[in-house]
Image: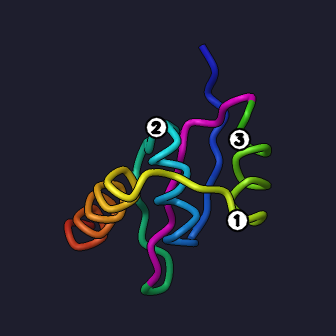
Amino acid sequence: MNNSTYSTNDLWLSAFLKAKGLKIIRVEGNNRRAVFVFEDTSNRKELIEEFYNNGSVGVTLIKNAMADLKSAIFNME
């Protein structure tokens, strides 16, 4: 089992990664900022590169991912 994780506080990158299928393990609070912790995958670096090079994802997927992330932020303890 792979226990490797990837963390970021970039909301839009997180939404993109989630829309592309990466699994969020948890959301942590860090000095009034959310940190999204993903299960790492072999293609994570390529997905990040795709994001920064104007990669695309379906509007419904990104909308749903963003809603899920915002909900997770508001439900942080």
Bounds of the magenta segment: 33-42
Marking on residue 3: none
Residue 39, how many percent across, how many down? 56, 36
Task: Mark 1 or mark 2: name the one nearer the start of the chain.
Answer: 2
What amino acid is labelled 1 in the image?
Asn
Specify the farthest residue to the top. Answer: 1
> What label sits on residue 44 in the rendered view?
3
Q: Earlier in the sequence, mark 2 or mark 3?
A: 2
Q: Which mark is residue 54?
A: 1
How far is disc 2 from disc 3 in space, using C-alphas?
Answer: 11 Å
| Residue 37 lies in the magenta stretch | yes
The kind of residue tagged 2 is Lys
User: Label 1: few (<14), some or many (≥20) within 10 Å?
Assistant: few
Task: Quickly name the residue at label 2.
Answer: 23
Q: How many marks?
A: 3
Q: Could you tell me how far apart the alpha carbons at marks 1 and 2 are, in whole angstroms?
A: 22 Å
**Residue 38, quarter of picture:** top right
From the viewer's side, name the closer residue of 53 and 36: 53
Q: Residue at x 74, y 28 (%)?
A: 42
Q: Secondary structure at mark 3?
A: helix
